[in-house]
């Protein structure tokens, strides 16, 4: 009876197991170094904030293996990057190219900073114009000086 329970529990847990393709290292150390250098320049499409070299997502493992296979077949880094960009778009690049579609990525932060500084300058200039310096009449000026000197005989109006 005990072995039947162990068998049923094992059988039930076997359904939750899933196969994951392993990272196959290239047979040549220099080729492996080139592949990992290129993978560190590409974005994981699943994790999005990690490079392909850092990610353990199944898609990242598959893409690293494709990079190795293409390098073994004689493809250059540029050919591999062009293939991945054609397949997944510019998003796969960690440092996107400077094109018309990626122009907001490159110009956006600078434009936002300039707009923020302009708004700050405009706000400060406007607030300094709104608060004019208080002008005292000659009598009020004499009374203020008397109050500052501590003359108790001067009466405020």
Image (cartoon, rainbow, N blue to C red):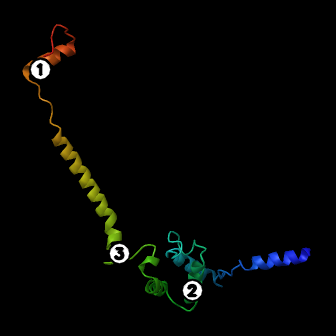
Mark pair 3, 2: CA separation: 26 Å
Circle nearer the N terminus (3, 1): 3
CA gap between label 3 and label 1 equals 64 Å
- Residue sitting at x 61%, y 74%: 56
Q: Secondary structure at mark 1?
A: helix
Per the image, the residue denoted by label 2 is 66
Query: Which residue does the image show at 68% across and 82% down from the upper left?
Result: 19
Residue 7 appears in which quarter of the rendering? bottom right
Residue 60 horizontal/vertical position (percent): 57, 78
For the residue carrying disc 1, how many other residues have a C-alpha within 10 Å: few (<14), some (14-19), or many (20+)? few
Estimate the x, y position of residue 100 in percent, counting from the top left. Answer: 31, 78
What secondary structure is marked by label 2?
Answer: helix
Residue ID for mark 3: 102
Give residue 63's position: percent from left, percent from top.
56, 82
Seen in the image, is 126 located left or right of residue 33?
Answer: left
**Secondary structure beneath disc 3?**
loop
Residue 71 point in image, percent of width and height: 55, 87
Query: To which quarter of the image does residue 5 belong?
Result: bottom right
State the residue in front, 116 or 53: 116
Given the current orientation, which residue lies at the most extreme right position?
1
Q: Quadrant of the C terminus?
A: top left
Is 146 rendered above or below residue 49?
A: above
Residue displayed at 11% across by 29% down? 135
Report crowding for label 2: few under 14, some 14 to 19, many 20 or more residues within 10 A (C-alpha): some
Tell me what residue is drawn at x 27 percent, y 54 percent: 117
Q: Earlier in the sequence, mark 1 or mark 2?
A: 2
Among the 4 quarters of the image, the one containing residue 102: bottom left
Which one is nearer the viewer's eye here, 136 or 14?
Answer: 14
In which quadrant of the rendered image does the N terminus lie? Answer: bottom right
* Residue 140 numbered mark, or none: 1
Tell which circle, 3 or 2, labels the residue nearer the N-terminal end. Answer: 2
């Amino acid at each position: 009876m005990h072995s039947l329970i162990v068998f049923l529990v094992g059988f039930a847990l076997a359904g939750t197991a899933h196969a994951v393709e392993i990272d196959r290292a290239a047979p040549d150390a220099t080729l492996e170094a080139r592949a990992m250098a290129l993978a560190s320049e590409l974005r994981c499409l699943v994790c999005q904030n990690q490079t392909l070299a850092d990610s353990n997502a199944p898609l990242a493992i598959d893409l690293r293996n494709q990079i190795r296979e293409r390098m073994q077949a004689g493809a250059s880094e540029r050919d591999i990057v062009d293939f991945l960009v054609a397949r997944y778009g510019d998003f796969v690049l960690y440092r996107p190219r400077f094109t018309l579609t990626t122009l907001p990525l490159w110009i956006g932060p600078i434009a936002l900073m300039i707009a923020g500084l302009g708004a700050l300058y405009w706000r400060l200039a406007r607030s300094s114009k709104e608060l004019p310096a208080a002008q005292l009449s000659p009598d009020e000026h004499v009374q203020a000086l008397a109050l500052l000197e501590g003359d108790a005989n001067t009466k405020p109006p």
